[in-house]
Amino acid sequence: MEKRAYSKSVDRISQLPESVISEILSRLPLEDAIDTCFLSRSWRHRWKDLQVFNFSAIPFKNQKGFLDKQGHMRFLSLVNDILLHHRRAPVRKLTIRYVTSPGLDVDYAALNAWVYAAIESHLEELKLESSAGWNLMLPSRLFTCCTSLVNLELAACQIDAEELTQVRFPSLKNLKLVFHNPNLITNILSGSPVLETLDLRVTTQLGVFKIHSPSLKRLYYFDSCSTRTELLEINTPLLEYLTIRIYTSQYRLISVCNSHNLLEANLDCYADEDYVSYVPKLINSLCNVKSLVLHRYTRYCLVRATQFDLPEFRYLLNLEFVNMNFNARFLFRMLERCPMLQVLTVHGKSPLWASRHEWTQPTNVPYCLASQLSIVNFKTYNGIKDDQELIAYILQQGLALKSISIGFAYVSINSEQGHRMINELWDLPKSSKMCQLYFNSYQDSIYGDT
């Protein structure tokens, strides 16, 4: 009976459209997709129709986590056998993660051959990551022939910008680049008329660097190693999301122009005392933003800056402080400049207040607290007097409050001390009858509400 039932079974997968079968195979680990050739005669060559390839040297590392010579040769052999002899269908998506171990050289000739094999008009996505430093020279043909390219990620790669007389990426929407040549970005932006997302990791001194794009909507800018930048100019009229992380000391000026559509700005900007003025100027250029996230270094720069008046954030609805200690004066100074603020979040790994900062009740109640602020999230409550008095003040003055979420950073909410702290907060008077209190631990597990 079992044999008869098996013989009458239907191979439903083989009856699927070829495009669906190819998509299924492309989602399998590459070696598993190749092993389907043993299923039957009809499956012997199906893997050769794959158009999506994801090669990584990591699975070829030994038990100690190193890519030894044997694993290296196996990786090279696999990619060569598949990519260089793949002729039945054009490659649409190619990912190569060629990360070697110390003392093991990258085969630059092979890596360049793989890139050449994939470069053609049908290529939609290319992601290259190599531990080869900056020795991998990408062919200029990549920037002129891949007219269907939508996603491009290049890490540890080098391109001679002088040879790029023309860049043609009419379909490119997403670009992620670890770069050391500012001219390269300028050339790519000029040849990418529909680019929407740009992720830049800086590895060199910039001098004067301009990011101009009429189509860009999301910009991620990260710099942890450049020495001195005189000017970073961002002119992107359609920009909606901006993230800037700078962990190097010598930036002089960052200008964000035409940011009228900006929905969210996420800033973590460090500077030495002599260069701190660029952060207030950056803040001033973002006065139309609707959501603002300020990290520890940004707050330090704003506090240290002399003769600086915060702009009025007329459209700001969400304000978030990440991983910082700050005093009440700075907090309420920000609230006074955000008349329409609805959500306030404070979180980090340390208490709300540094021990040297004592709570001082403001002389004037910020407009947003009395009329607009509806959600407040504190992620680092530890029960000290300053914390409790701040929350008490917000509960008393917050006429529009709907919820306050309080996270215990150093005390378990299920401990005796945790229960005592909860009861103290629970008994605080509230001006808003709609306001609910939520308590959660550092791991964000919900305790209760009223």
Image (spheres, rainbow, N blue to C red):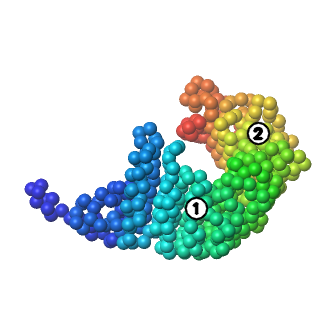
Is residue 216 visible in the rendered image? The answer is: no
Residue in view at x 65 percent, y 58 percent: 179
Q: Nearer the viewer, residue 361 or 76?
A: 76
Q: Quadrant of the C terminus?
A: top right
For mark 2, does the 10 Å Cα neighbourhood hold few (<14), some (14 to 19), or many (20 or more) residues?
some
| Numbered circle sitting on residue 137 | 1
Disc sitting over residue 326 in the figure: 2
Q: Quadrant of the N terminus?
A: bottom left
In the image, residue 13 sits, relative to residue 224, either above or below, namely: below
Q: CA distance from mark 1 to mark 2?
A: 47 Å
Mark earlier in primary sequence (1, 2): 1
442 is higher (above) or lower (below) than 217: above
**Is 6 situated left or right of 50 in this image?**
left
373 to the left or right of 366:
left
Residue type at mark 1: give it. Met
Point out residue 194 in the picture as x, y percentages from the top left corner. Answer: 62, 72
Q: Residue furthest top?
A: 416
The reply, left or right, for residue 64 in relation to residue 186 is left
State the image coordinates of residue 334 (x, y, percent, origin top left): 79, 48
Instruction: Give the residue type at disc 2.
Output: Phe
* Kind of element beneath mark 1: loop
Residue 442 in which image quadrant: top right
Q: Quadrant of residue 447 in the image?
A: top right
Find residue 383 and report its image quarter: top right
* 333 relative to 440, above or below: below
How far across and down, in percent of the image, does residue 211 sit? 72, 64
Q: Which residue lies at the image location 71% right of the left edge and 29% below the top edge?
A: 384
